[in-house]
C-alpha cells in the first residue's frame, strides 16, 4: 500500500505527465468550443430564413433556365439546330420541391445523433495522453536510475513493476472518468444551447455508456502498452516516440505496398481500423474493384466486416504480449 | 558472531550478443565482520561494482553464495533490504525532482518516517539546497544526496560504491568522519574507493580484488605487514661506514641493498641481530626501522598495476590469481591472505 500511494504521488509530481494531461484537456476544450461555435439552434426564424433562401435559389434557377431557353429558341430560329437537336422544350426549370428548406438550415447539434461519434475523438485524445504518460512514467524512472534506487528499497521486482502499473492505470481511469463526465456535460450544454437534446431514451444512454466503457478500456490499454514498451526498452518517452513514429511509417508503408500489390481490403492490415471497430462496434471495408451481384443485378462493391469482437482479440493479444514481455524482462534481466 | 556479509565463490559472466562473454567475477570471496569499516579495493574493471550490484539483487550471479546479516541472498533480500543502505556507482536520480522530493518518495516507499529525510539532508550538508532540482546539482552534491539516500533507512550494513567520487577535500574529510561515527554507532560499512590514503586511514580491514578474484584480504595492518616483505632500514652514525656494515651483514646471512644514506636489509629474523652484529665491530646504529609499505604500494604490487615508464597499461592488465583451490583463496605468488 505504501508503494502504491508513493507511486500515485510520484505520478502526480511528474511535470511531463501533468503537462501532457493538461495538453490533452486543452485539445478537448478546443473541440467543444468549436462545436459550440459552428452549431446553431434551429427555431422558426432559422426555418423561415432557410425557406427564403430555398425560394431564392429556385427563382435563380428558373431565371437561368428561362435565359437558356430563349437563347436556344433564337438559335433554332436562326437555323442552327446542331447545338440543340432535340428542341428547346427539354430545357426545363427544376421543380420547386427540388429545393428543400432543410438544406439551407445552419448546422445544429443533435445530441442523440452526434454525441456518440465525439466519444471516439475523446478516446483518441485520452489514449494518446495515456500512452505518453505511461511511457514517460516508467521510462524516465529507468533511464534516470530512479528504478535502481527504488529496487534497493523494494527488491521484489514484479511487485514494484505492477504496483507502478496499477498506480498509473488507476490515475488514468480517474482522469478518463472525470473527463468523460465533463465532456458529456459540455456537449449536453452544446445540445441545449446550440441544438437539441431531444429523444434521449434510456436505451440511447445505455448505448452511450457502453461506448464510453469501451473508450475507457482503450485508454487504459494504451497506457499499459506505453508503460510496457518503455519498461522493456528501459528508456524515456523519447525512444517511445521513435517506436510510435516507426509504427506509423510502417503502417503507411505497408498500406502503400499492399495497395500497389492490389491486395483486397487493405484496411484489414491497418491497426487503426481495429481501433475504430472497437469504438464503433463494426467497421465495414469496401472493395470497389470487386463485384458482388445484388438483387437488381447491379454491381455492388464487395464488403468485409471487422467487428469489435475481432478487435478485442487483437487488443488483448497485443496487451498481453507487451505487458507480459515487460514483466518477463523485469524478472530476468540484469540492472546495470 | 556471524559475519555481516559473506561471499563465496561468486561468479558472474556478462553475455552480450556482439562482444561475447566477459567474466567479471570468477570465484570471488569476501567476508565483512560486524562493526567494521571494510575497504573494497581493486583496479578499474576488476569487478567491485559487479560484486555490489550482485549482492543487492540487481544482477543475477552465475554461481556462488552470498549472505547478508546471516541470511542467504538474493532469496532473503526482501527481508534484509530495510537493513541495508546502499549506493552503487555514480547513482542517478530523476533530474526534475528536488533532493527533498526524491528522498521523501523513497522514505514513503520504504515506510521510513518523513522526519528522517530532514535529518539525513542535514547530515550530508544539503539542507539549504534540498528544495532545488537535482538537475541543477554539482557532481559532489549528487554524491551527497546518494549518501543521504543510503543513510535514510538507518541501516545495519551500509554499502557505498565510491562515495568519495566528486567530493571536495572538505567533503572527503566529512565523509571520513561520518563513516567513523557511523561505525562507532555500530553500523558496518563496506565501501569501495580508489583513494587509498583515505582507505588506510579509516578502514579496519580491506579486500583487494583483481580481475574478478580476491588477491588479498584482512585487517589493514596485517595486509600491510605481510606485503612489506619484512625489510629493515639501517642507518649508521657515519655514512662512510656503510660499505663495511653491508659486508658484515651479508656475511651474517642477510640480503643487503645499499641506498644513498642507509641500507635495506632483508632475510634477518630479529632486528636485534643487526644491532649485535654491527656493535660487535664497533659500528653503532643510529636508526633501525621496519620498512612499512603504504597501502598504495601494496595495492600496486598485489594487483600488478604499478605504472611502468614508457608503457601504457591497459585496463584488465592486472594480476591474475590462480583459481582458488577448495574454499581458501590463498595465493602462492602474492601471498594473499585467506
Ligand atoms: N553491463 C555490462 N555488460 C558487460 N560487461 C560489463 C557490464 N558491466 C561491467 N562489465 C564488465 O565487468 C568487469 C567489471 O566491471 P565493474 O564495473 O564491476 O568494475 P569496477 O571494479 O567497479 O571498476 P571501477 O573501479 O572502474 O568502477 C569489467 O570488465 C566491465 O567491462
Ligand atoms: Mg565500479
Image (cartoon, coloured by chain):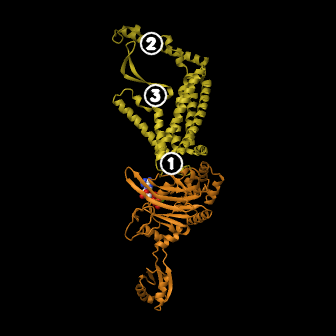
Q: Which chain is orange?
A: B
Mark 3 C-beta to ligand 1 under 8 Å = no
Relative to A234, say whether B283 is above or below.
Answer: below
Percent position of residue B57, x then y = 51, 52
Contact between marks 1 and 3 (CB within 8 A): the answer is no
Circle 1 residues within 10 Å: few <14, some 14–19, many ≥20: many
| Quarter of the image with the N terminus of chain A in it | top right
User: Which residue was labeled with disc 3?
Assistant: A310
| Colour given to chain A in the rendered image | yellow
Residue beneath disc 1: A142
> Is any atom of residue A207 visible in this view?
yes
Element under disc 1: helix
Mark-to-mark CA distance, 2 and 1: 75 Å
Chain for disc number 1:
A
Q: Which mark is residue B12?
A: none
For label 2, the residue is: A65
User: In this view of the protein, can residue B94 be seen by the observer?
Assistant: no
Residue sitting at x 46%, y 91%: B281
Amino acid at each position: 500500500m505504501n508503494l502504491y500511494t508513493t507511486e500515485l504521488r510520484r505520478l502526480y509530481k511528474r511535470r511531463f505527465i501533468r503537462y501532457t494531461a493538461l495538453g490533452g484537456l486543452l485539445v478537448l476544450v478546443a473541440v467543444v468550443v468549436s462545436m459550440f461555435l459552428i452549431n446553431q439552434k434551429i427555431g422558426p426564424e432559422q426555418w423561415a430564413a432557410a425557406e427564403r433562401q430555398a425560394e431564392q435559389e429556385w427563382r435563380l434557377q428558373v431565371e437561368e433556365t428561362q435565359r437558356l431557353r430563349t437563347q436556344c429558341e433564337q438559335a433554332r430560329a436562326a437555323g442552327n439546330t446542331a447545338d440543340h437537336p432535340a428542341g428547346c422544350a427539354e430545357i426545363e426549370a427544376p421543380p420547386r420541391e427540388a429545393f428543400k428548406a432543410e438544406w439551407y438550415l445552419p448546422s445544429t447539434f443533435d445530441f442523440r445523433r452526434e454525441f456518440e461519434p465525439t466519444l471516439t475523438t475523446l478516446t483518441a485524445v485520452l489514449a494518446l495522453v495515456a500512452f505518453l504518460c505511461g511511457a514517460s512514467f516508467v521510462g524516465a524512472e529507468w533511464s534516470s536510475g530512479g528504478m535502481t534506487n527504488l529496487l534497493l528499497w523494494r527488491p521484489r521486482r514484479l511487485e514494484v513493476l505492477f504496483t507502478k502499473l496499477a498506480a498509473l492505470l488507476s490515475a488514468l481511469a480517474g482522469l478518463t472518468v472525470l473527463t468523460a463526465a465533463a465532456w458529456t456535460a459540455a456537449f449536453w450544454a452544446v445540445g441545449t444551447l446550440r441544438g437539441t437534446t431531444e429523444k434521449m431514451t434510456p436505451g440511447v444512454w445505455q448505448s452511450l455508456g457502453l461506448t464510453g466503457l469501451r473508450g475507457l478500456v482503450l485508454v487504459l490499454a494504451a497506457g499499459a502498452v506505453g508503460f510496457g514498451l518503455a519498461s522493456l526498452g528501459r528508456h524515456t518517452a523519447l525512444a517511445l516516440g521513435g517506436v510510435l513514429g516507426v509504427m506509423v511509417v510502417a503502417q503507411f508503408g505497408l498500406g502503400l505496398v499492399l495497395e500497389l500489390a492490389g491486395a483486397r481490403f487493405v484496411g484489414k492490415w491497418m491497426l487503426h481500423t481495429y481501433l475504430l471497430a472497437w469504438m464503433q462496434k463494426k467497421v465495414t471495408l469496401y472493395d470497389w474493384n470487386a463485384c458482388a451481384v445484388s438483387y437488381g443485378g447491379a454491381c455492388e462493391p464487395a464488403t468485409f466486416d471487422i467487428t469489435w469482437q475481432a478487435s478485442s482479440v487483437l487488443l488483448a493479444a497485443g496487451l498481453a504480449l507487451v505487458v507480459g514481455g515487460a514483466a518477463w524482462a523485469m524478472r530476468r534481466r540484469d540492472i546495470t | 558472531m556471524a559475519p555481516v556479509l559473506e561471499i563465496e565463490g561468486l561468479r558472474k559472466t556478462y553475455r552480450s550478443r556482439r562482444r561475447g562473454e566477459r567474466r567479471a567475477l570468477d570465484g570471488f570471496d569476501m567476508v565483512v565482520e560486524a562493526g567494521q569499516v571494510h575497504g573494497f579495493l581493486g583496479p578499474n574493471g576488476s569487478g567491485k561494482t559487479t560484486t555490489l550490484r550482485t549482492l543487492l539483487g540487481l544482477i543475477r550471479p552465475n554461481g556462488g553464495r552470498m549472505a547478508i546479516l546471516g541470511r542467504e541472498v538474493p532469496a532473503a533480500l526482501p527481508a534484509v533490504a530495510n537493513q541495508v543502505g546502499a549506493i552503487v556507482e555514480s547513482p542517478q536520480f530523476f533530474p526534475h525532482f528536488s533532493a527533498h522530493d526524491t528522498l521523501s518518495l523513497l522514505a514513503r516507499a520504504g515506510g521510513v518516517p518523513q522526519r528522517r529525510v530532514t535529518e539525513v539532508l542535514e547530515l550530508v550538508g544539503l539542507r539549504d539546497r534540498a528544495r532545488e532540482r537535482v538537475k541543477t546539482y554539482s557532481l559532489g552534491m549528487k554524491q551527497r544526496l546518494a549518501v543521504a539516500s543510503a543513510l535514510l533507512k538507518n541501516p545495519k550494513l551500509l554499502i557505498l560504491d565510491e562515495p568519495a567520487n566528486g567530493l571536495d577535500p572538505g567533503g572527503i574529510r566529512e565523509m571520513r568522519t561520518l563513516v567513523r561515527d557511523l561505525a562507532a554507532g555500530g553500523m558496518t560499512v563496506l565501501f569501495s574507493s580508489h583513494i587509498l590514503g583515505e582507505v588506510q586511514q579509516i578502514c579496519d580491514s580491506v579486500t583487494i580484488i583483481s580481475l574478478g578474484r580476491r588477491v588479498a584480504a584482512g585487517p589493514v595492518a596485517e595486509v600491510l605487514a605481510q606485503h612489506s616483505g619484512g625489510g629493515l632500514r639501517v642507518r649508521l652514525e657515519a655514512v662512510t661506514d656503510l660499505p663495511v656494515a653491508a659486508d658484515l651483514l651479508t656475511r651474517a646471512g642477510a640480503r643487503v641493498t645499499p641506498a644513498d644514506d642507509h641500507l635495506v636489509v632483508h632475510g634477518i629474523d630479529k632486528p636485534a641481530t643487526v644491532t649485535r652484529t654491527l656493535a660487535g665491530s664497533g659500528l653503532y646504529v643510529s636508526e633501525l626501522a621496519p620498512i612499512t609499505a603504504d597501502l598504495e604500494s601494496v595495492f600496486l604490487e598485489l594487483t600488478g598495476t604499478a605504472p611502468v615508464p614508457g608503457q601504457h597499461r591497459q585496463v584488465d592488465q592486472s594480476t591474475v590469481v590462480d583459481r582458488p583451490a577448495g574454499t581458501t583463496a590463498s595465493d602462492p605468488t602474492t601471498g594473499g591472505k585467506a
